[in-house]
Amino acid sequence: MTRFLSQIDLGQFPSPFALEEIHDYLDSLSAGDRAAKAAVDIALHDLIGKIMGQPWYKIWGLNRDKCPCTSFTIGIDTEEIVRQKVEEASPYRVLKVKMGLDKDKETVEVIRQMTDVPICVDANQGWTSKEQALEMCHWLAERNCLFVEQPLAIDRHDDTAWLRDRSPLPIIADESLQRIGDVRRISEAFDGINIKLMKSTGMHEAYKMAILARALGMKVMIGCMTETSCAVSAAAQLSPLADYADLDGNLLIANDRFDGMHIVDGKITLPDTPGIGVTLL
Ligand code: MG
């Protein structure tokens, strides 16, 4: 990241508003480095918003009352740890469960002994056959699950399309897509996409991806990696466009240097401050 950031020269552009040209320039320097490009993009968005005196959700014409609830992640773990995590997650109105190991059903059963809140399932490419994935989708649909994320490996496009045609639950792409160029191909096999700023090179392309997915009739999810409140708050500006949000990465770190969006009663709550809405702690 440092090597990429040290080679860029934004002085050649007339203003931070030249986002389209700046992104073309960043992409001309390397094919990857998506998180480093996202850092530049998020800083530019914050600056533009501050120059305009407006938060990004308003610049995009979005209504912050429409921010979705975010899910809170329960990892693959022992029964005792799963119970502890479900207790910790009591302020959240949606749980996200990581799957793809042999204890999948046990984990859901432990959670269902404790709470009826809806569950999102992330299989992380972990199910090995389309038949097993379909059986799991039916089983999960009977247990108040909302959708299944990335059930099969990224090279199993045709099997995922087969599953999507039969599954009672929406199938959402995560590892199968990175950037806007992937969205149309993905729409043949998935019902929706999980957009993450660290994959999309930031807010500029993430917004376009959300609009394209909607135009293709797909569901939109806004997710994150393990990130500070800086990146999570930038992603949250887009969240009124999303059906689902998984923006809990900042809750999983001990060295967050920013204050920004908050989760209030399980719901993403955006501050009414210009830019991406963060302050340095
Ligand atoms: Mg995922």
Image (tube, rainbow, N blue to C red):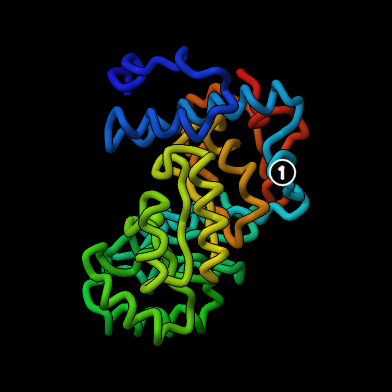
Residue 191 falls left or right of residue 78: right
| The N terminus: image quadrant | top left
Is 46 drawn above or below residue 163 in the view shown? above
Residue 8 falls left or right of residue 227: left
The residue under the point 49% across, 50% down is 223
Quadrant where ligand 1 appears = bottom left
Residue 77 or residue 142, whichever sits in front: 142
**Residue 10 percent across, percent down from the top left:** 45, 17
**Residue 192 percent across, percent down from the top left:** 48, 66
The amino acid marked with disc number 1 is Thr
The residue under the point 46% across, 61% down is 193
The residue under the point 46% across, 56% down is 194
Is 182 drawn above or below residue 189 in the view shown? above
Residue 217 or residue 91, whichever sits in front: 217
**Residue 15 percent across, percent down from the top left:** 57, 19
Element class at badge 1: strand
| The C terminus: image quadrant | top right
Residue 107 falls left or right of residue 132: right
Residue 271 appears in the rendering:
yes
The residue under the point 58% across, 68% down is 118
Residue 79 appears in the rendering:
no
Residue 260 or residue 39, whichever sits in front: 39
Residue at which label 1 appears: 269
Q: Quadrant of residue 38?
A: top left
